[in-house]
Amino acid sequence: MSGFDELGFAKIDNQRHERRGFPEAVFCEGKTPGQVAKIVQKMNEGKSNILATRASAETYAAVKDLTPEAEYSEAARLVFVYKEKIEPDPDRVILVMTAGTSDIPVAEEAAITAELMGHKVERIFDVGVAGIHRLFAQQEKVQSANVLVVAAGMEGALASVVGGLVSKPVIAVPTSIGYGASFNGIAALLGMLNSCASGVSVVNIDNGFGAGRLAGMINAMR
């Protein structure tokens, strides 16, 4: 057994779910809509949920032609197919937060990824440090979460603030939102990496998928 499906232009890792608990995700950027559509169609022969990231509306249309049950989140740029119903643990919640409304697309990528893994996800948007009273008004949700994902651009300060308030893991996602000196997310990335709050980990700029995947892995641990 080869462990992958050969499509000529792609080799689909059909054993990743067994190795890592989640199937291969399709990264759509750099692929044609037709290539993504054929990859998803092949994966749809299996039993696992399917996720394709950074998908355009054009890519989704091509996928939909071959896989009618595919769904699309325009905000998160995600194409996904629910193949299995995973009942979430209602007592173990992943909380996805944003500093600003402009960070929502990255946060939604994280949230939907975690939901596709079978986790209960709650969302709090636009609670950045420029109006920190908005965050304090959400303390009950913040304190009850089992894992927190914090997406922030500009200087990325929200992750440090949240990290200083909770005893649970915080996954910080720097976003490319901000003016020139934010350097397309580098300022937020460095700010998060230099956080003085312990228990804060950082993923790559705009990597909502990576944050959602990691949050789901942590949330599933017993």
Image: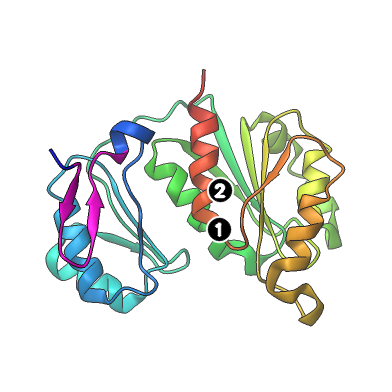
Q: Could you tell me residue 103's position as x and y percent? A: 63, 64
Q: Is residue 136 visible?
A: no
- Label pair 1/2, CB-CB below 8 angstroms: yes
Amino acid marked by disc 2: Ala
Query: Seen from this angle, which residue lies furthest front?
Result: 2
Per the image, label 2 sits on a secondary structure element best described as helix
Query: What residue appears at the point 39 percent right and 39 percent down from the top-left corner?
Result: 117
- Of the numbered discs in the image, which one, if any, rests on residue 207? 1
Quick check: 34 above or below 39? below
**Residue at mark 2:** 211
Identify which residue, 23 or 79, lies in the foreground.
23
Residue 119 falls in image quadrant: top left
Query: What residue appears at the point 70 percent right and 68 percent down from the top-left corner?
Result: 185
Crowding around mark 1 (Cα neighbors within 10 Å: few <14, some 14 to 19, many 20+) is some
Query: Seen from this angle, which residue lies furthest bottom?
Result: 180
Q: Could you tell me residue 202's position as x and y percent? A: 67, 49
Location of the N terminus by quadrant is top left
Query: What residue appears at the point 48 percent right and 44 percent down from the top-left corner?
Result: 213
Residue 73 falls in image quadrant: bottom left
